[in-house]
Amino acid sequence: MRGRFGTFPGVIRSRRALALVVVPVLLLGACASGGGAGSTEPATVDDIGSRATPAGIAPDLVYVTDVEGFDLAVQSVGVSGDDGFSATYTREVDDRLAMVALRTARTSVIDPSVVVPCDELTDTQTTLLCGVVRGEAFVSLEGTDVDAATLRAAGEAVRVPTVGELPHLFSEVRVPDGPVERGDLPEEGDGAPIDPDHAGG
C-alpha cells in the first residue's frame, strides 16, 4: 500500500508471502492436469509394442482384466504360444492360492467355439475355463479355486491395458537375448556339427 508516507514494509512482506504461496499452487495444478495425462487412456498398439514386441508378444494380443480381490502376478506375464500374451491373477484364500490365468491367441489359429463363452459359464462345468473374443484376439480365462461367477466377471472385464499400467505390466517380462549360436557348426557346407576325430568311437 502506498500513501503519502510511501509503501508500508508490512504490506510488501504480505504480498511476497502471497506470491510464494500462489506459485506452488499453480504449479501443482499444472502437474495434476497435465503430468499424468493419458495414463488412464487405453494404450495404443505402438505404446504396447515398445514393450511387448522385444519379448515376442504381438502388441494387438495384449489384453488384461480386472478381478476383484486378485492381484496381477507380474512374474507370470510373458509370451503364450507363438506370439500370444499370458498373465495370472492371484489371491490367497484360506492358505490356498486362487488363480485366474489369462492367455491370448489369434482367432485365426484357434476355434473359439470349442471353449465355453465366459458369459455362459456355470458352476456345473467340470473345468472352469471360458473365453471371450476381443477384436482379432481370443482371450481364454482358466480358474483355480475360483467360482464361475469370478471367471464370468473377469471375462466381462477383459480390456486393453491403459498407458499407466504398462510399466508395471511388463516390469518382469524376460526379453530373449537372441538366437542361440552354436560354435560347432561350420560356416560352409550342410551345417552338420563338426565332431573331433574319433569322437564317439
Image: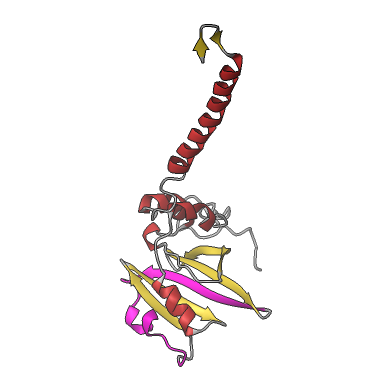
Residue 6: in magenta span: no
Left or right of residue 160: residue 127: right
Tell me if residue 167 can be seen.
yes
Q: Position of residue 3 (x, y in %)?
A: 50, 10
The answer to whether residue 199 is above or below residue 9 is below
Of the 4 image quadrants, the one containing the C terminus is bottom right
Q: Position of residue 113 (x, y in %)?
A: 32, 82
Name the residue at 37% across, 85% down.
Answer: 120
Name the residue at 31% across, 66% down.
Answer: 135
Q: Position of residue 37 (x, y in %)?
A: 42, 45
Quick one: which residue is furthest to the front in this view? 4
Compare residues 102 and 145 and report the one nearer the observer: 145
Name the residue at 53% across, 69% down.
Answer: 88
Name the residue at 53% across, 25% down.
Answer: 19
The answer to whether residue 28 is above or below residue 10 is below
Compare residues 185 and 160 and report the one nearer the observer: 160
Left or right of residue 75: residue 133: left
**Residue 12, located in which quarter of the rendered image?**
top right
The answer to whether residue 142 is above or below residue 197 is below
Q: Position of residue 149 (x, y in %)?
A: 46, 82
Question: From which residue to which does the magenta span run?
Answer: 96-124
Residue 100: in magenta span: yes
* Colouring method of the image: secondary structure
